[in-house]
Amino acid sequence: MSSKVVGWLVKSLLLVLGVIFGLDLLAHFIAEFAWFENLGYLSVFQTQLVVRMGLWVFALASTGGYLIGNLVLARRWRYHQPVDIDKTEPGTLKLAQLLLVLVGLSLLLASLLTHIGQVIIQFWYPPTEIATSSSQSLQQFTFSATTHVLRHWLQVPWELLLVAGFTAFLLWHPGFVLGAIALCLSLGLGLVVSNHWTTILAFMHATPFKNTDPLFGHDIGFYVFVLPLWELLRFWLMGVTLTGFISIALIYLLAGDSLSQGRFPGFTLPQKRHLYGLSGALALTLAWGFWLDRYSLLYSTQGILYGAGYTDVTVDLPTKTILSWGAATIAVVFLWRAAFPRPARRPVKLSWILSFYVGIAVVAGLILPRGVQALVVQPNELAREESYIEKSIQLTRAAFDLDTIETETFQPKADLTPAKLKANDSTLRNIRLWDTRPLLEANRQLQRIRLYYEFPSADVDRYTLKTSQPVNSGKESATSTTEKRQVLVAARELDYGNVPPEAQTWINQRLIYTHGYGFTLSPVNTAETSGLPTYFIKDIGAGNNEGTLQTATPDIAASIPINLPRIYFGELTNTYVMTRTKVQELDYPSGNDNRYNTYDGTGGVAIGAWWQRGLFSLYLRDWQMLFTQNFTPQTEVLFRRQIKERVEELAPFLRFDSNPYLVTANVDVEAFNRTDKPAVPGTLFWVIDAYTVSNHYPYSDPGQENFNYIRNSVKVVVDAYNGSVTFYSVDLNDPILKTWRQIFPQMFQPLAAMPPSLRSHTRYPVDLFRAQSQSLLTYHMTDPQVFYNREDQWRVPNEIYGEKSQLVQPYYLTMKLPEAEKEEFILLYPFTPVRRNNLIAWLAARSDGENYGKRLLYQFPKRELIFGPEQIEALINQDPVISQRISLWNRQGSRVIQGNLLIIPIEDSLLYVEPLYLEAEANSVPILARVIVVYENKIVMAKTLDQGLAGIFQTNGQETEAIVRPVEAEELAPPAS
């Protein structure tokens, strides 16, 4: 085959690949454009596209220009022929020295590329957890990063062999390999830089926090908005300058057949000037890095506190400043020699300067801090660190919004009476006896209807229900009142993975099985006589009520909207579907038959035209779209139907709560419609809490989180039928939200614009509450000495769930807070001291009306024993009568599941309630078998909560079916310390 034919084939292949890549890029662009436009957020897409493309082009061009330009110069100035031994330059290297330098440079280059490759993969395949650019930190290539890579190679033999092969190939074909590295690095760094488009936009629209850090005096906004950009610039410059220096050095060292000759003849003057210039650029990058490392001291973890401590301020800060100026001085020397190559009369050897600099870095950067910490700080640690501890406490509390928590003392009293219980009837009627896990299991057995339906989650909420009561017996006239009931809502979604394998065809997946149908709504505190859950809303009606959800009473039907219960957008809708085709969609099962429907909402993107079908078949990688005969001119495709994926695509700069919850409400859906299409009225909406986060807040301890600043600044509403997405601003004082509102002014609506029927269901989010609570465990101690000694450290208690011990989780309650006028929906979390089990405090977050977002911390007297969850669990499980009954059930083909132990504050008293579920081994439908109530010196196990309370407060001669057990005096005694 002639060279012309080979060349023609190569050009044809490249042309075909180019056309395919171009079409794929065009399909992606048009699909994304259409999706954003359909949701009414086209401006968001346009801004993102312009910024990302601009950054990618800039990074690609500048990186490629720098690396390839220097390779071109190196090819010009390198040795083209072997050099005679008599014509060598100063600095000749023998074979052993040459091999040592070459292998060292190759390994350094390989470790750099490995490090950058890991960062690129992280952005190309992000972790499953939500990680926004506002909370990510680029891992810089430093000495510690190099040693980490080398240790990893030694632990993974095949990677070490791969590095050895890379080194050999590099030394064999340096020109080709280094050219390929320059191209790949340009593309990779372009991807990394473009993925930080949110960093660039936030920097350009930075909002001051109006609070400064105590070390450098910068506004907090500098660290949240500006420092991430400088870190990105440092990462990019280090990758470019170090790769450039190593590549050019290898080109010169390997030129002139030096390995075959067994020696390197030394660098010529043009080569030296070139390397001096590259070394100057690298030294400037190092100087920039050391200067930025000064700010990293604000996030130091080497002492007893988070942030800069005594050693950081007195030793590390001056050291990094000196190293920064020293590297800048060395850079000036290098650049001077590159520009003015004539040697001075008394030249100073660069090796001396570099050795002195490295010596300072080792002594002042590694040895001196450890010596000061061991000899100066630790013998007088509290005195040395007290002022820094105070700063860490202050800024951590500000970052996690702990300063606004109101603290009160809760003095429990043993004065709970039947009269007080009656006065708090609403609290008792809303005690959650059904946990989400047994309810979901019951739903899957009783309410699934078909195998392809699934209940992914159940969420606690409250609804205002109408209650009709007759005025006089025998008459039909009635009065209508309302009451708030705490309920569990679970969406009946379609899970295509549960469709039988033989039915999993393309038509079924894309055209027929398109949506879920309905939901269940259960009161949290009642069960049927059989022990199964009570349902206010359940099933899918048949006959005259075909397609409607079944309600327990007319009052429920009048209180809760149930029309149009189709769920096209939810938590399990991970597939894309086509609607308005010649094939009708499965709507819901009706007896032995099915009912069908055609989607008429606004959530689809048109693909009726042949060119739209072709582009979307390429975008979705679905070639059957090209050949199906079932499409019509009105056909649309619904994709990105999973609600978290949907909102993350629209607002990647926000962090979203892990638990969206379903709300049913009568709402004018046009309030959510941002397009010209008429929206179809629906009643099901998903509410998702969104957070602004950062990991750059100075002195703020992140604890177990990957951020150290958080605000619940946004709430998102997603229409389950139309797919519309609306963002509501909650915290208008949050500087990060202010920044994004400047960038996307039309994206966020004021919270007042949220329909009241939806706003009444907003709740304080669990993820935020848990993060704040974890921080509060330590940072409720505001006195530096108490903090240093950890005298009052708290922890989250454990409870028995099923047969396993687990951490108590925050739980929602409807209750009346001390000194409050009425019951409200709150989120509660109990705390115990470290290494002790008694209750020390509980934190409550309010969710209703004007009190939304307020938090109250109730602390118990430290000298009194208030039983904690672990102690109550021990009393229950150690009681001989109760434990014998549980053991008997476990031996009769059933399994007892101990539910969540709830601590219920009622006025000035504490009531402990734990449900017991019974689950047969042959049939995994759990039933509510018993309720355990603990108060003061009594433990009661009864069939219902009312019976349990009657057993606690029974008067002389009163009979009860409950098992009433006393708590012995020795059991009440506090544990020995």
Image (cartoon, rainbow, N blue to C red):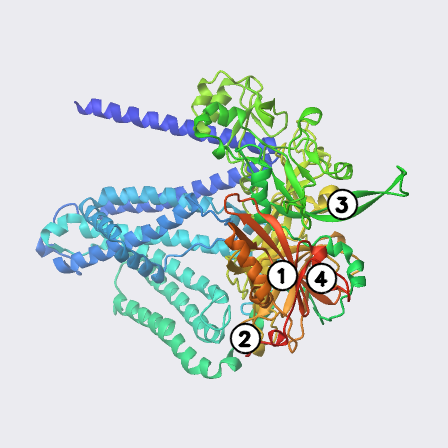
Three-letter code for the amino acid on which mark 2 is drawn: Arg
- Label 3 – label 1 distance at C-alpha: 25 Å
Across and down, in percent, residue 327 comes to 37, 64
Q: What's under tag 1, amino acid-wise? A: Tyr
Q: Which residue is mark 1?
A: 829
Q: Position of residue 220 (x, y in %)?
A: 58, 61
> How many residues crowd mark 1 within 10 Å: few (<14), some (14–19), many (20+)?
many
**Residue under the image location 57 percent in, 31 percent down:** 515
- Element on which disc 4 rests: helix
Check the picture and name the quadrant holding the N terminus: top left
From mark 1 to mark 2, how far is it between C-alphas? 21 Å
Quarter where residue 518 is shown: top right
State which tag comes first along the sequence, 2 or 3.
3
Relative horizontal placement of residue 458, taking residue 4 as reference (left or right): right
Q: Secondary structure at mark 3?
A: strand
Q: Decide which of tag 1 and tag 2 comes sooner along the chain.
A: 2
Q: Which mark is residue 951?
A: 4
Q: Compare residues 166 and 867 and report the one nearer the observer.
A: 867
SS at badge 2: loop
Q: Amino acid at mark 4?
A: Gly
* Mark 2 burial class by Cα count in 10 Å: few <14, some 14-19, many 20+: few
Asked if 563 appears above or below 407 in the picture, the reply is: above
Q: Is residue 221 visible?
A: no
Residue 632 vs 742, above or below: the answer is above
Please state if 702 lies on the left or on the right of 249 as rendered.
right
Q: Which residue is mark 2?
A: 790
Residue depicted at 27% across the width and 58% down the height? 341
First of labels 3, 1 by sequence position: 3
As measured in the structure, the alpha-carbon distance from the residue carrying label 2 to the one carrying label 4 is 42 Å
Graded by Cα atoms within 10 Å as few (under 14), some (14 to 19) or many (20 or more), the crowding at tag 3 reads some
- Kindly identify which residue carries mark 3: 464
